[in-house]
Image (cartoon, grey):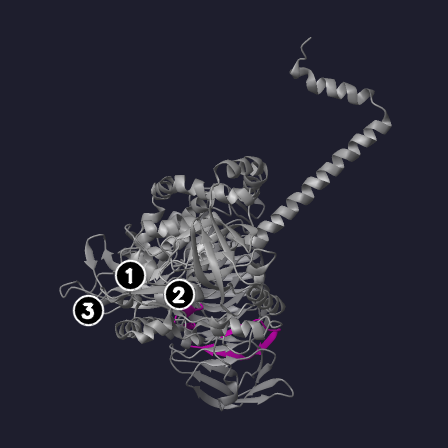
Amino acid sequence: MRFDLTQLPTWIMNRWRRSSGRMKTLVATVVLLLAFTATSLGSMYYGVILNKTRRAITWDQMLENVLGTKLAIIPHWVQGQIFGRPDRLGISMDATDFAKLQMKRDAALKTGILNSGDDDFVPAFLHHGDMTTEVRMRLKGDWTDQLLGDKWSFRVKIKGDATLFGMKQFSLHHPRARGFAYEWLFHRALKREDILGLRYDFVQLSVNGKDLGVYALEEHFEKRLIESQRRREGPIVKMNEELLWADRASTPSLSRSPTGLQSEQAGFVDAFGLQSVLDSKGMYKRFVLGGSLLEAVRSGEMPAHKAFDVQRLATYYALCDLLGSEHAVIWHNLRFYYNPVTALLEPIGFDANAGHLIAAPHGAERRWDDPAKDFKNVVFSDPLFCQEYTRALERLSAPGYLESLLADTHKDLNHQLSILYREFPWVYFSPSVFQRNRDVIVASLHPKAALHAYAHGRTPEAMEIELGNIQSMPLEVESISFRDSLVLRPSERIFLAPKVPDLPVSYRVVTFALPADFPKNVKLARDLKVQYRIIGASLARTEAVFAWPRQNNEVLSADLVRKDPNVDRLPCFAVDEAAKRITIRPGRWEIHESVHIPGGYDVVAGPGTELFLDPNVTILSYSRFLFRGSAEAPVVIRSDGRGRGVLVAKTGESSLEHVHFIGLANPNLNGWEVTSAVTFYEAPAHFTQCVFADNKCEDALNMIRTTYVMENCRFANTQSDAFDADFADGRIVGTSFENCGNDAVDTSGSTTEVVDMQVNGTNDKGISAGENSRMTARHVRLRNTAIGLASKDRSQMHVQDATLDGGGVGVTLYVKKPEFGPSAMDVDGLVMANIQMPYLVEKGADLSVDGTRIAPNRIVVRDELYGARWGMATRR
């Protein structure tokens, strides 16, 4: 009888239903325990990953690692046992010498740092096959992670003429110390690029007969390293790190040493095998020159391209990006060979700890102006080096390069992995980390945008462009073009440093000379584009130039709003801090500079006070006005039409009685402009018997976002509108308007009550309500108005007892701004005389006069207004 697997879920459910409650409880408990165990193991594994990489990983990456390591342990072990055939090395030494190493290890474990020197070497014998040779050896490593358990790390020097695998000096350490097989691939990748790398293999090691398992064998720095890679002997230089580790050992309890000895600047330029270098006249000269080159670069006195084989150094950094080898370019891991033929320094790969994910390439986000010079920033501040580096990044991240590297090393890599699997079957090697790093490089080389360009200014001879790099790679600006035809190039190469995270964009102004015959009246800014590229990149990029300056410092320096208050130094003002009162002294005062009055005061003026505003002078007050003039001696603020008016903002209620505002223009200072001669913004006010006359701007008085009362005031000879209310609610009583250039009263988004108002002469509307305003008007007399009463844009007007005498249009309702819709008006007691067009009513509007609905007589009204047939052109 065959069991149908498709029926398995049904069979399980039936068995579950028939099982007892005790059995169900037992099964549920087992399932919960399994789930808890799986979650705990997963969390522990994720913690190990975080501890190793210092980077969080995604769930798919974690799953990949779990599947790649845990589930592959058995086949890895089998592969290691069958195919892992390492070279076997043996070391033997006297018990006293081994004890010396033991004591050195125990001392290092106490301080957490291993400091080693020539005195720490002990004699021993090295055994390999039939070869036995004398060696000197010591413990090796900086941190004590290389001294844990039985797998201590060693430095070995072979005595006499013998070598091991062509090496005279080498290190033996736990494969974990360099990231297992990733380090092997790192050195193979370097040699593939003809960059100096180390011989790096995995061997089986025993010490005094005790099998210590698989070790990494790493070549040390001496002439055979150089000569084996087809180069002439030359010194190998580095920045000495002895003080770094000595200081760390002496300050183990401090998270940061106060001495400064751990910086790279504290390390002098050193050479491997220094004593033999000093003993050789030729090597000494080469060391002095090579060391001087390194010192000149790291101090910022020489650009990297003059001291280094720049193509090899650039490729070295790019390869470290691709392989995730940030550790290899830490200053104390840098090693350089001085090539006596080229007289240039070349990098030697060392201690890469490869196989990590990168967040950005090394050349990204590097400061060019860091005052605390460090080698990496200095190197990447050299545009010519960056040019070669970008080219290397493009080549190494191009499709096929990584695949070719892995294919070329596949056979040997499998051999090395087989050796590792003998002892470490859980080791996981995945090229996916390189593929992800490649994605990071490609994204860095192809940002969606890379710079901002602003039209900074123009002279007859040149165009000035302000440029800022907004992303993480360095840029070169090649030209600007006008209307895709005229191309302007800078007089020298223009480089822009990368944008540094958390710092503002750094901008610079670049001048492009214009042809002598270029027309002076052509506006360049709107048709400019800048051509540039990431330094060294094959792809050229283009961005439009913003047709405005990024920041006009001249405007900001003259900005009254942001200037400090100055009333305390103007003679016409007396400041009483205790009473929080600013008094304008009686008499006539000529104001030569704009006035900034701070908030929190009462500004007081009495009869006989007059302020004359010189040209371009504005009064800006954040304190309320308490001005009390008289009919015979009003408070006067006047000008000859060039004084820039008054703005009162964000105050308590002002009270103005018998105040005259005569001959004022609107505030207009370096881009900051208010449309009215007198403006109250979020500043309630009560006006009594005030005069607004002879203004030289759009509005004589403008109330914005506030409330007001206006009693028995007078507006005369206004250039445009007399009174304008924007989102302001108020009451106008007994006020007259004479000879208005546009409207007498114009409201927007406001609620207004008008009582006993007289208008004589407007070039546009007598009373206008717009933008969803509400208005009631009683006892109004309008004479010689181009348009008498106007309701627009969903406004509602209620008028009682209105006389219109002389003018173009008597009453009009229309839509000017479609977002609002039609308006309404009802008028009771309307008298019209000498009116050319009594009613101009748009379709959809609602007009009632003395109880009778007036039918619309136009589809669209506004086309006949604003100077087209009736009234004057206006912003409203």
Q: Is residue 475 visible?
A: no
Q: Amino acid type of disc 2?
A: Lys
> Are the residues flagged by discs 1 and 2 in contact, CB closer than 8 Å?
no
Q: Name the residue tied to disc 1.
A: 310
Residue 827 horizontal/vertical position (percent): 56, 51
The residue positioned 40% from the left and 59% from the top of the image is 470
SS under mark 1 = helix
Q: Nearer the viewer, residue 268 or 148?
A: 148
Q: Name the residue tied to disc 2.
A: 376
Q: Residues within 10 Å of mark 3 (few under 14, many from 20)?
A: some
Closer to viewer: mark 3 or mark 1: 1
Q: Earlier in the sequence, mark 2 or mark 3?
A: 2
Q: Name the residue tied to disc 3.
A: 461
Q: Is residue 281 above or below residue 608?
A: above
Residue 781 horizontal/vertical position (percent): 51, 62
Closer to viewer: mark 2 or mark 3: 2
The residue positioned 50% from the left and 84% from the top of the image is 566
Query: In which quadrant of the rendered view does residue 464 lie?
Result: bottom left
The residue positioned 42% from the left and 46% from the top of the image is 439
Query: In which quadrant of the rendered view does residue 581 lie?
Result: bottom right
